[in-house]
Image (cartoon, rainbow, N blue to C red):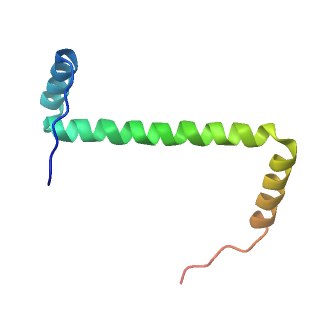
Amino acid sequence: MNTQTVRISETDHMALSELSKKSGRTMSAVLSDAIQELARKRLLLDTNDAYARLRGDARAWREETEERALWDGTPADEAG
């Protein structure tokens, strides 16, 4: 795996080190998890913002809900 150097504050480094010790995982693994969690959070916030904008446009929201109703009326794929 290729690695890169990132500068962080001494305070953040101490917090990362403590989290690493408490979890029994490497600092890199803890940092990777934190980055992934932040990315998921950002995706959800962006999605919520997009839906808020969509709901703000009455015509677009009506079209969205009408399309959902059509999809809700289709039979589900059956496994097997």
Q: Residue 18, located in which quarter of the rendered image?
A: top left
Q: Whole-percent x and y of residue 49?
A: 64, 36
Q: Whole-percent x and y of residue 42?
A: 48, 37
79 left or right of 37?
right
Q: Residue 74, located in which quarter of the rendered image?
A: bottom right
Residue at the extreme bottom of the image, as rendered? 80
Q: Nearer the viewer, residue 46 or 2?
A: 2
Q: Is residue 60 above or below residue 78?
A: above
Q: Could you tell me how many numbered marks the image carries?
A: 0
Q: Whole-percent x and y of residue 56?
A: 79, 37
Q: Residue 40, located in which quarter of the rendered image?
A: top left
Q: Whole-percent x and y of residue 1?
A: 14, 54
Residue at 65% across / 41% down in the picture?
50
Residue at the extreme top of the image, as rendered? 11
Q: Nearer the viewer, residue 76 or 19?
A: 19
Residue at 15% across / 35% down in the picture?
27
Q: Nearer the viewer, residue 19 or 2?
A: 2
70 left or right of 22?
right
Residue at 31% across / 35% down in the picture?
34
62 left or right of 54?
right
Q: Is residue 6 above or below residue 2?
A: above
Q: Nearer the viewer, residue 65 or 24?
A: 65
